[in-house]
Image (cartoon, coloured by chain):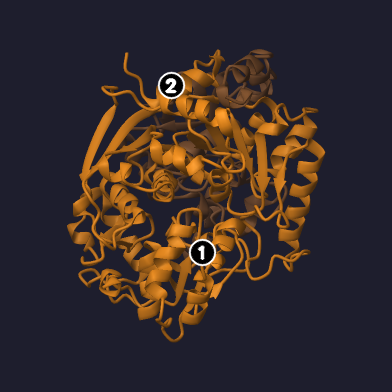
Chain colours: A orange, B brown
Amino acid sequence: MAETLLDKIWRAHTVRTLPSGQTQLFFGLHLIHEVTSPQAFQMLREAGLRVRFPERTFATIDHIVPTASQARPFGDVLAEEMTVHLVRNCKEFGIPLFDLDSGRQGIVHVIGPELGLTQPGMTIACGDSHTSTHGALGALAFGIGTSQVRDILATQCLALDKPKLRQISIEGTLHRGVYAKDVILAIIHRLGVKGGVGYAYEYAGSAIEAMSMEERLTICNMSIEGGARVGYVNPDATTCAYLKGRSFTPQGDAFDRAVTWWMSMATDPGAAFDDVVRMDAGDIEPMVTWGINPGQSVGVGERIPDPVAAPEPDRAAWSEALTFMSLQPGRPIVGTPINVAFIGSCTNARLSDLRAAAEVARGRKVAKGIRALVVPGSQAVAGAAEAEGLHEIFQEAGFEWRKAGCSLCLGMNEDKLTGREVCASSSNRNFKGRQGSPTGRTLLMSPAMVAAAAIAGKVTDVRKLLG
Amino acid sequence: MSQDNVRRRIVGRGIALPGNDINTDRIMPARYLKSVTFEGLEAHLFEDDRRQAADHPFNQTYYRGASILVVGQNFGSGSSREHAPEGLRRWGIRGIVGESFAEIFFGNCVAIGLPCLTLNAADGGWLMEAVARYPEQEILLDVENRLVRFVGRTFPGMIPDGARHQLLTGTWNATGVLLEAGDAIELVAKRLPYVTGY
């Protein structure tokens, strides 16, 4: 019988059915960082437990790390304390840590794929909702809370209900200036921020198949913004080519055997889904959010919507969002003034993202009064970008070139909005207060669109700058 | 399992928090995640929302001592931070009832013994208004019988079988149950090609 990737991975990792009816599922890869792990290690100590498979957990430092300078000790004593605890916990329990001096530090969802830790057919968990990112390589990757981090440390397993599966098929070709970020924003706009609750998303169709691995990572990253805890793309030749030669990827004959197994885990032709949604890639425009959740977006050529026209259940939410954002319904989104431009985050801080933004920034200048920063997703991304001179393009244009970390996506380090600043951001959440100022405002868009906004000082259609 | 961990029925006064898609950044702003413990989080619950709205439910003295939170749709969306349910629990919340919950948040609540029951939209809307009108009355969350009762009205309250079982048997801290699998865990690991080197 034809099976989906979800079916196959679930079956291969099932330890047993629990008395509760849930599945005890084995996890092949566990990633941890400094924010959601310290309490889990403490719970482990209090229960007198050890880490069951220390070689299957990997750690890095990303959320609180400063990006102006990564020199220790950090100026922020709380950030320093969290880092000290992570280093100590990893040492005590024998967990490998990609520390700041390793050359391999970065945002956990950037380094997993980059190091080849993330592989098709795996189950992956991390105490971070954007763990869905890793599904781009054909894995089932779950964002979890701290109690579940404890469960994985102690048992390498979780108690889970199997999700339903929705295939989202994107057919056709994207127009120039339309990126993976626009595709996922368009999907969330269509299905809503809670449309995916209870589902895993399988992204398929010719537009997804044509995407590079980095583009697929952007798509899967924001599955959770559509309510789906898990999102994946079936492994294919692009996946295998991406993995070849990476640090933790098997080498030689083992690689060939791995490819055979990886490809066998893909959804079989004719497999059934609980739901199927089809969209046309050619219909997608560069997207910009106008509200306070990632589903509240419009195409860059459109106008800010009027709550009067909203479906009744959404009317109050649209009004609340527009009031918070101080945006006028009926006005074009183009021309909305910004104060800050942020290129970074686990959604859009990989080399191809920086290249796309640099293509826009090259030979141009950031508008007067705009604070613009580029925060690479990892030390490796930073190194690769510098090797091809992208940092100089950004710096000449007036962007700050920073060290790797989560940074202004969630404002846990020194990078924050101030007061009611408006930020054009390549990150994933436009929630109230998300970027470190309780009244700060976020407009989500692709990295190229952020670069265009930085240069114009306002929301701009990047296609006009691409020639 | 200790009887103290069993969550069969929760009774307490309600606190009505209207609105959909209230995410964990709003429940617990990220700056309060800069700690290696969960201690003191209750002081920062909804801090930014409360400062921007004097009429926020968590600012109202008449809701002090409430232990059952009434919410709308997709409560707890966004970040997986367990600091959000921990803040609620430490503030005194013992159960949550709403129209729907984000998945990671729901799992985090169960993992700390905080039952979440869902109602249909009509019942949820009625309960939200009724609790705001009668904050002195107690709500019953009946996990065992999947019911929610308030001022004489009773509604079906939905909860998945697995979570319900964990709450009724006091096994919501899953570590113990997962450890009971013993060597079966290693047996699964050993048949996975990526564990054995392909």
Residue A225 lies, with reference to residue B105, above or below; the image says below
On the image, numbered disc 2 is attached to which residue? A8
As shown in the figure, which amino acid type bears the numbered disc 1?
Gln
Does residue B13 appear left or right of residue A360 in this picture?
right
Instruction: Judge by depth and name the residue closer to the eye, A242 or A171.
Output: A242
The percent coordinates of residue A415 (x first, y second) are 58, 68
Residue A300 lies, with reference to residue A429, above or below; the image says below
Quarter assignment of residue A448: bottom left
Residue mark closest to the camera, 1 vs 2: 2
Image point 56% across, 39% down: which residue? Answer: B67
On the image, numbered disc 1 is attached to which residue? A435
Q: Looking at this view, name the residue that lies furthest to the front.
A: A252
* Alpha carbon separation for disc pair 1 and 2: 39 Å
As shown in the figure, which amino acid type bears the numbered disc 2?
Lys
Which quadrant of the rendered structure holds the C terminus of chain B? Answer: top right
Image point 23% across, 68% down: which residue? Answer: A329
For mark 2, give the secondary structure: helix
Does residue B142 appear left or right of residue A298 in this picture?
right
Instruction: Judge by depth and name the residue closer to the eye, A272 or B46.
Output: A272
Quarter assignment of residue B168: top right
Q: Which chain carries label 1?
A: A
The percent coordinates of residue A19 (x first, y second) are 55, 13
Image point 26% across, 66% down: which residue? Answer: A300
